[in-house]
Image (cartoon, grey):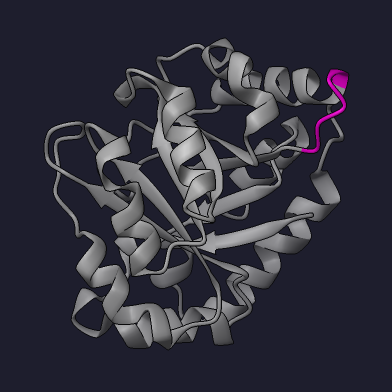
Amino acid sequence: MIRIAPSVLACDFSVLGAEAARMQDCGAEMLHLDVMDGMFVPNISFGAPVIRAIRDKSRAQFDVHLMICDPLRYIDDFRAAGADSITFHIEAAEAPKKVIDAIHAAGCRAAVSVKPGTPVETVYPFLQDLEMVLVMTVEPGFGGQAFLPQMCQKIAALRKECTERGLSTDIQVDGGINASTVREAAAAGANVFVAGSAVFRSADAAAVIAQLRTSAEEAYGTQL
């Protein structure tokens, strides 16, 4: 299933609740919420209180991406704030299985992310326990970066591994997604697309979301 997840990192933070509601009205199934601590990545964004403040503004799935150190410590906080799915970085967890188990115990979908320089094989031992894997297509920490096309090799390898195991794991991509790059990522096997600038800085967000979805549907898996 193809899903589009606008990243609020690119929205107008002064009206964050209204932006969350607008994305739902524009047809987005998910809202991507990047939590940065200034240590795991060189930027600071927002935390659980901000997510809690906008939870009632949208019925979209809250897709919380923890770009933080020690994610295990904060799982319950983000679930209480309204997260539907929680993604943590494999690079930030000493015991990934404990984090996955904590996410499931909290009642959320569990996902793990890999940076561009991290081999995708590092997540293979945990695939059977994950609902989603996020392949970063830029270096995490800042919005508006250019898509790294070489990450499509990771996506294709991951999709092949999932298929061979009989898993229907979602593969999400985040970074530089637009009408062109969404086709590359979808062809390689990704089916969940985080888009920030392309959506929030457009004159017609609904049209962009629809275009991204159509392009991804047309290209999905064509290179497999």
| Relative height, residue 144 to residue 162 (above, below) | below
State the extent of the magenta-drawn residues as a range.
Answer: 164-168
* Residue at x 74% of width, y 52% of height: 216
Q: Quadrant of residue 200?
A: bottom left
Residue 18, given in percent of the width and then of the height, sits at 35, 88
* Residue at x 85% of width, y 25% of height: 163
Instruction: Inspect this view and state whether residue 176 appears.
Output: no
Instruction: Inspect this view and state whether residue 112 appears.
Output: yes
Q: Quadrant of residue 28?
A: bottom right
| Horizontal relation, residue 152 to residue 32: left or right | right
* Residue at x 49% of width, y 34% of height: 100
| Horizontal relation, residue 213 to residue 115: left or right | right
| Relative height, residue 124 to residue 169 (above, below) | above
Residue 21, given in percent of the width and then of the height, sits at 45, 86
* Residue at x 81% of width, y 44% of height: 219
Residue 113, given in percent of the width and then of the height, sits at 47, 32
| Residue 179 counted in the magenta span | no
